[in-house]
Amino acid sequence: MSVETISGEEYSVTYNDNTQSIKFDGSMRLRTSEEYAPINDLLLKAHDATPAESLLTLDFSSLKFLNSSGINIVSRFVIAARKQAHLQLKVIGNQDIYWQQKSLTNLQRLWTAVQIDIQ
Amino acid sequence: MAQSTSTSQIFGHWEAVTAVPTTTMSLDAAQLSAHWRRNSLSSDYWAAYAALHIPETVPAGWLRRDDVSYVLSYLLNELFENCAKFSAGPELAVHFQAWLLDERMVFQLTNHIKPQGERPFITLIEELLNGDPDELYFQKLEANAEQDLGGSGLGYLTLIKDYGIQFGFRFQRASGESTAVTVQAHVNLREPS
Ligand SMILES: Nc1ncnc2c1ncn2[C@@H]1O[C@H](COP(=O)(O)OP(=O)(O)O)[C@@H](O)[C@H]1O
Ligand SMILES: [Mg+2]
């Protein structure tokens, strides 16, 4: 069992392989996809470590802000997971954070198998 | 549809707002770029400032103050980031203007580019204004997943598609080496249907 965290001045991303979940916190508005690379790598690592057909959860409920470059990274991950069809994906959102109500459901349109839970 | 005079070209939903802006601010694109967080700080500040324009309780069908604050933070951050990323040429001034009106808010950001940068940006604007935002959005994501082209090109698309924000663009030749680009964003204070 291990927990791995990437953090910047205003955000953190934590992968817990025991709960098979990745939790995003704070405000994540990095400049380029290169700057998002460590987060992308963590997502891919979590993907590969998740047993076949098992569930991986992306928890955005504490992420106040994500810029369009970040939306791109998350969307790319969902597309990659769809193409590999290795695991199941669940996305947790927060009703009180307006962008999550507006934009998280787009992930389901990229891959209809994604479960979206906006609490 | 492009309208043009000898000095300026206009695209999309452009309004010559006559009222005095509620707020204005001038910055420097190099300074925004040197400290990236200045983009989010500026946008969060003005978002919170503008959101106080919304009453504490609103009738059904109108955006709540907190929601407006979130929308504006996202919008302004995307616009400030663009000024920081794409300003070019000798002139690096960035001007911010906001009009807080009864049923809507209008925001304008002006930055400068080299005249040879006009064409590619205009081509992109025309694609954005003439296409179906939903279709363009998903096409772009699938294309980005195939190939990383550096920029995601999702800023304006998410704003149009997810938030119903309408954009106008104005290009003004300032000198032989510099063109002022003004992006105008219209935020409707009613819930998008
Ligand atoms: N303020 C601006 N000045 C010059 N060019 C811009 C500006 N805003 C946007 N652009 C051009 O339009 C493109 C699309 O912008 P956007 O939708 O925000 O996506 P991204 O910032 O990810 O490239 C940019 O890649 C850039 O070429
Ligand atoms: Mg952008």
Image (tube, coloured by chain):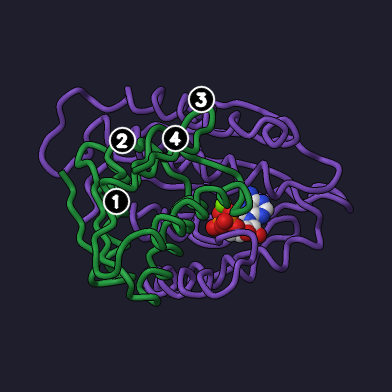
Residue B11, x across and y down, in percent: 56, 62
Give the residue at x 27% y 31%: B66
Residue B23 marker? 3
Point out the tag, 4 or 2, that comes first from the N-terminus: 4
In the structure shown, which secondary structural element does the residue marked by tag 3 occupy? strand
The color chain B is rendered in: purple
Q: Disc 3 or disc 2, which is closer to the eye?
A: 2
Name the residue that disc number 1 marks. Answer: A20
Q: Amino acid at mark 2?
A: Ser
Q: Amino acid at mark 3?
A: Thr
In the structure shown, which secondary structural element does the residue marked by tag 4 occupy? strand
Chain identifier, colour green: A
Point out the tag, 4 or 1, that comes first from the N-terminus: 4
Mark 3 neighbour class, 10 Å CA radius: few under 14, some 14 to 19, many 20 or more? some
In the structure shown, which secondary structural element does the residue marked by tag 2 occupy? strand
Horizontal placement of B146 versus A61: left or right? Answer: right
Q: Amino acid at mark 1?
A: Gln
